[in-house]
Amino acid sequence: MKRSFKIILSLGVAVLGGFAYGTIALRRGESINSAYVLIAAVCTYVIGYRFYSKWIAASVLTLNDRRATPCEVHDDGKDFVKTNKWIVFGHHFAAIAGPGPLVGPVLAAQFGYLPGMLWILIGAVLGGAVQDFVILFASMRRNGKSLGQMMKEEMNSTAGALASVAILAILTILLAVLALVVVKVLAESPWGVFTVAATVPIALTMGCYLRFVRIGKVLEASAFGVALLLLAVWGGKLVYQSPHWSQVFGFCDLTVALGIIGYGLISASLPVWLLLAPRDYLSTFMKLGTICALALGILCVLPDLQMPAISRFVDGSGLVVAGKVFPFCFITIACGAISGFHTLIASGTTPKMISRESYARHIGYGAMCCESFVAIMALIAACTLEPGVYLSMNVKGEAAVTVAKVTALGFPVTVEQMNSLAQQLGEKSLFGRTGGAATLAVGMAHIFSKTFNGRWLDLWYHFAIMFEALFILTTLDAGTRVGRYLIQQVLGRIWQPLGDPKNSRAIPLASVIMVGAWGYFLIQGVRDPLGGINSLWPLFGIANQMLAAMALCLATTIILKTQLLRGNGILTGRKSLVLITLVPLVWLLAVTMTAGVEKIFNADPRIGFLAQAKSLDGKLAALQNAVVTAPAGQKSETVARAQKAVQENRTLHFNNLLDAGVTAAFLVLAVTIVSLSLREWILLLRGRRLPKLSENDPVWLPEYAVKEAGQDLRPLAGTVALTVVLAKELSGEAGLERSRSADKICHCEIGGNHQASHKSDQQLYLEMTERRFNGVRRCC
């Protein structure tokens, strides 16, 4: 009965999803309701998690709850900490769900809703979630080692060294862009600054409460944490309405940037239980709660998508993202589909906190599906705005010039309309709010406000701002901590004490180096005359996808070795299983290599870094001449304006040359690492290199620990691959052969003893489990 219900439910989900996809595909030339996109997305995630992730867990990775995880073996109360699985899920989701799923889909909405929607859904279920799951599992089996360390051990020292350099360089760019998005959304916004700043003491209070006052009382801490967070949003409104406090918290962009740099420095050094874990867990309530509320709001309001399925900007003429839909749509939307940054978290903080291997499925695969759902919500919120309002917010420039430019493209909007909307939202202006975060907040506020008959638009807007800033800051502090781990690994090779994670002097030093690196690019972006996002976001996308390609190279190598090792046992290794990571790798390489070459060498100054630098050089002489020939009567004002134009010209020129150099370095590193990986795969397949895995020796948990985790291992019984792995683990050097029958094990050799058996896989599995718990080393 239960099985029949599951089958009927799965068929129902498939039919409902097929209906939604069919409606989206067949309706052209007319507006479509956003509910169809929402339904298609939910059905896709349910099917992917229910079937694809379970198949990977059982057939490819063979998760084993009896095997101790790194936090069980190395519990130190600082980095390796046994943590409740839902708090780990909250931390992991909050850490990976940064600006990518929020900002990327909003910026890519200029291409229309269809390209972004398909990339988010297909990329996440078949690529991003698989990548996160496999890398998390691999790091758990290797004492929580980083991506660079695993590449060194599983491939070779050259690949590991290059990967470490590439990871640090890419991570620097990623964190700088994350911080820049926060700066753009919080600058000159006293309401937002107060609300976001209040989340820090709230998280510290939660951490101390769970550590010292009421140990393990997660529900209690969650209740007062969420209550204080909502109170902070209301307090922000009082700050905004007060002339004095509004001026106090109305920081400029440079001040906000310096504050974020200071926050990153502190958060990377504090123990994980004090700020990082409780803050991420707290923000997860707000993130998932807000996204679910937004989904319900969409179903209640049923707004139509104002953007077409495919817009006129797919030809590369877009005002928000310069370039054609391929490849720039696929690097603009990174974290919502597949993101290399996730692998730094999956091989950084999360594997040091997760207490059972089976949790890797819902934390690795499940959290990525949740993040992809966030990206779909962001895409819907952006596409329900009027295109004129959307474009006016995301184009840098004076109000009148921006309105004229947008209206000339066929998207009518007025200065009065934008100013009126800003007043309703409690903001001074909405023009030039580049970065996408403010655009998403406006879209969310409209949906929430319509749900409540058009009320509290300003409150909903600033709630959305707080929601977005929490998303990004939690990624920023987790990413900085991962960067600190990597810096310490490098410093440890110079002087061993600097690599000690418990060294009280090495931690601040590594934190200063990491924060100083991304802080430099952050300040550069803040001072960029075009707003920073226009030039740095494509670089962010390229860097992110390059890192994902490196992670997929490692995942493919591990899966290939695993299958080759299984070929010596009871079943023949299925080398075709490498396709689950190899196919996404090939697609990512095609996208990122094309985008990288376009950004460097494209002749259009709007796209190519070198072309724009050349164009700026051509304008420099005229700008310098304007300074010299300024009229005598208006010399001071005119000269100041001309000098500012010259300074902006030189700033943009330097930024473009720097971005071109960084992009070229990323391309060279990626090509080198992929070439080394390909060589490794060929040697393995030809038998010239032994498929040796660098997993740590297993440490087995006692029976009570598994029971305490509430795990029932029997549903996985009957899987031949799992039986083989368990038999080898229990017997040490066990030689196993498979009979001609596909579902019978006829022979088992352990320590020289041979006994015939005709038991089923399930019977053998259960007997092995029982004997293991009773301390018996035999399986037959």
Image (cartoon, grey):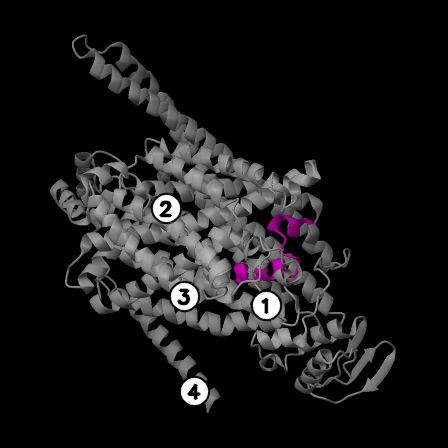
Q: Can I make out residue 636 in this image? A: yes
Which marked residue is nearer to the observer: mark 2 or mark 3? 3
Type of amino acid at the residue the image marks with label 3? Glu
**Mark 1 sits on what residue?**
356
Residue 5: mark: 4
**Mark 3 sits on what residue?**
220
Which marked residue is nearer to the observer: mark 2 or mark 1? 1
Q: Residue at x 67, y 61 (%)?
A: 73
Residues at marks 1 and 4, CA–CA distance in whole angstroms: 29 Å
For residue 188, above or below residue 716:
above
Which tag, 1 or 4, sits closer to the chain's start?
4
Q: Is residue 135 magenta?
A: yes
Q: Can I make out residue 539 in this image? A: no
Residue 324: mark: 2
Residues at marks 1 and 3, CA–CA distance in whole angstroms: 24 Å
Q: Residue at x 81, y 74 (%)?
A: 735
> What segment is highlighted magenta in the picture?
130-152
* Residue most extreme to the bottom: 1
Along the horizontal axis of the image, is 507 left or right of 292? Answer: right
- Do the residues bearing badges 4 and 3 touch, measured as CB atoms within 8 Å? no
Query: Percent from the top left, x then y, of residue 691?
Result: 74, 60
Which tag, 4 or 2, sits closer to the chain's start?
4
Toward the viewer: 769 or 693?
769
Type of amino acid at the residue the image marks with label 1? Arg
Which tag, 1 or 3, sits closer to the chain's start?
3
Which tag, 2 or 3, sits closer to the chain's start?
3
Query: Percent from the top left, x then y, of residue 744?
Result: 71, 86
- Secondary structure beneath dot 3 equals helix
Q: Main secondary structure of the magenta part?
A: helix
